[in-house]
Image: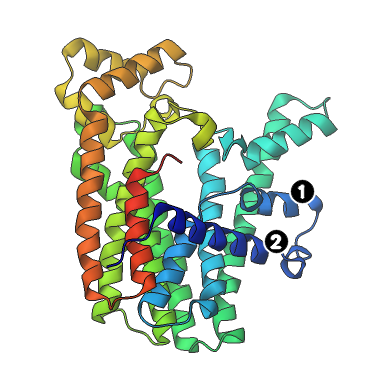
């Protein structure tokens, strides 16, 4: 493999992000969404940035099997929209007010309700924000499906491939992803000592890795223009993306306690307040003293926890290996993942996938 510099990689990622934003924000689609609040909510996260990692792996997987990534843009845009609706709903579930440095969809439209109808009770203003966000997510989900249909309608992909991808995304991927989200919520209400490392990694692969796997497999089958799940190159890309997806989420969890909120766009310590049972918490709890365990148990899941308690919990996580062991596990997964790329022929796209894997564990955003 020929190494791709970080500058080259980020440039390719930026080009991908720009094209997805251009497609999604095109008037051809935008005129469908009325009233204005729905249109603005549907495109809020697309316009506010984002790394577009999922579209990138789909496009580069298409190219890695010898296909033309140009024909895969409807699918690349579809997976970004699918991912986006899960973020919109996830922000409601997690009661987050910030995403990508700006207000989340439900918070943005709560503020809109406050500005337009200051006489309404706070509960009603919040309800409006949540209602707009739920409806926007519903629209994004349906839009993702219709974009996949464009593969056959406009780009010459075998309809059997397109139907297979739609069925996989809206059945297997959706159900696994939602089950991972629910497990994430349920784990917050279980004693820390009862949630195992295997439990956490199973939840992470469902919550995050399953969509990455779909992106890789979908890109490869679009590139080959046939149903080819069992072909060696497709299997290699699937195994690569599963491991990278989990590594991505592990790094995301690390940034949740060590990152710079001005860079990540999300408040540091939110996972502590929400009581997330991350691998950071798991490893630190194993090594912590009884007093430290007591503090962790008293702080995790407390939405009203004061900043000092959050800082102390984060210090315990760092002091007892939570960050380092999580980082080491992410590195291990990426090393395993990149061995699967050896099954692919030499190409610029294979090199970009290798750079993508490295970026997942070295990023600060």
Point out the tag, 2 or 1, that comes first from the N-terminus.
2
Q: Nearer the viewer, residue 345 or 38?
A: 345
Residue 33 appears at what percent x and percent y?
Answer: 75, 60
| Residue drawn at the location 22% of the way across and 26% of the way down | 284
Q: CA distance from mark 2 to mark 1?
A: 15 Å
Q: Secondary structure at mark 2?
A: loop
Label 1 element class: helix
Of circles 2 and 1, the one toward us is 2
**Label 1 packing within 10 angstroms: few (<14), some (14-19), many (20+):** some
Q: Quadrant of the N terminus?
A: bottom left
Q: Nearer the viewer, residue 114 or 154?
A: 154
Tell me if residue 235 comes above or below residue 184 in the rendering. below
**In the drawing, what numbered circle is on residue 37?**
1
Name the residue rendered at 69%, 46% in the picture.
Answer: 132
Question: Which quadrant of the structure image shows residue 31?
Answer: bottom right
Instruction: Tell me residue 92's x, y (percent).
Output: 55, 39
Q: Are marks 2 and 1 in contact (CB under 8 Å)?
A: no
Q: Quadrant of residue 214?
A: bottom left
Q: Is residue 95 visible?
A: no
Left/right placement of residue 149 relative to residue 258 reads right
Q: Position of residue 143 (x, y in %)?
A: 62, 66
Q: Can you say whether 270 is above or below 223 in the image?
A: above
Q: Quadrant of residue 262?
A: top right
Residue tagged by mark 2?
25
Label 2 crowd (10 A; few <14 / some 14-19 / many >=20)? some
Q: Is residue 238 visible?
A: yes
């Amino acid at each position: 493999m020929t190494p791709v510099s970080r500058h080259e990689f980020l440039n390719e990622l930026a080009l991908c992000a720009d094209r997805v934003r251009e497609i999604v924000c095109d008037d051809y689609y935008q005129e469908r969404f009325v009233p204005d609040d729905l249109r603005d909510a549907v495109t809020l996260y697309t316009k506010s940035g984002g790394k577009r990692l999922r579209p990138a792996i789909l496009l580069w997987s298409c190219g890695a099997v010898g296909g033309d990534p140009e024909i895969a843009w409807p699918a690349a845009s579809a997976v970004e929209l699918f991912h986006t609706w899960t973020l919109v709903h996830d922000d409601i579930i997690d009661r987050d007010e910030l995403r990508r440095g700006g207000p989340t969809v439900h918070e943005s439209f709560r503020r809109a309700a406050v500005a337009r109808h200051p006489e309404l009770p706070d509960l009603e203003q919040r309800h409006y924000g949540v209602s707009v966000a739920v409806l926007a997510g519903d629209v994004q989900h349906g839009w993702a499906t219709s974009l996949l249909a464009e593969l056959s309608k406009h780009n010459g992909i075998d309809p059997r491939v397109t139907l297979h991808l739609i069925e996989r995304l809206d059945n297997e991927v959706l159900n696994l992803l939602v089950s991972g989200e629910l497990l994430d919520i349920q784990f917050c209400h279980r004693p820390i000592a009862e949630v195992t490392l295997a439990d956490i990694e199973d939840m992470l692969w469902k919550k995050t890795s399953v969509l990455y796997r779909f992106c890789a497999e979908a890109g490869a089958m679009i590139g080959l223009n046939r149903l080819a799940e069992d072909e060696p190159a497709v299997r290699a890309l699937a195994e690569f993306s599963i491991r990278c997806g989990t590594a991505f989420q592990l790094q995301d969890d690390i940034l949740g306690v060590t990152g710079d909120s001005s860079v990540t766009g999300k408040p540091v310590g939110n996972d502590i307040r929400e009581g997330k049972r991350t691998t950071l918490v798991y490893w630190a709890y194993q090594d912590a003293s009884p007093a430290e365990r007591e503090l962790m148990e008293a702080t995790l899941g407390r939405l009203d926890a004061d900043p000092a308690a959050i800082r102390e919990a984060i210090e315990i996580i760092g002091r007892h290996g939570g960050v380092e062991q999580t980082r080491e596990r992410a590195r291990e997964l990426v090393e395993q993942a990149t061995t699967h790329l050896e099954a692919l022929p030499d190409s610029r796209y294979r090199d970009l996938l290798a750079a993508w894997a490295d970026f997942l564990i070295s990023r600060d955003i």
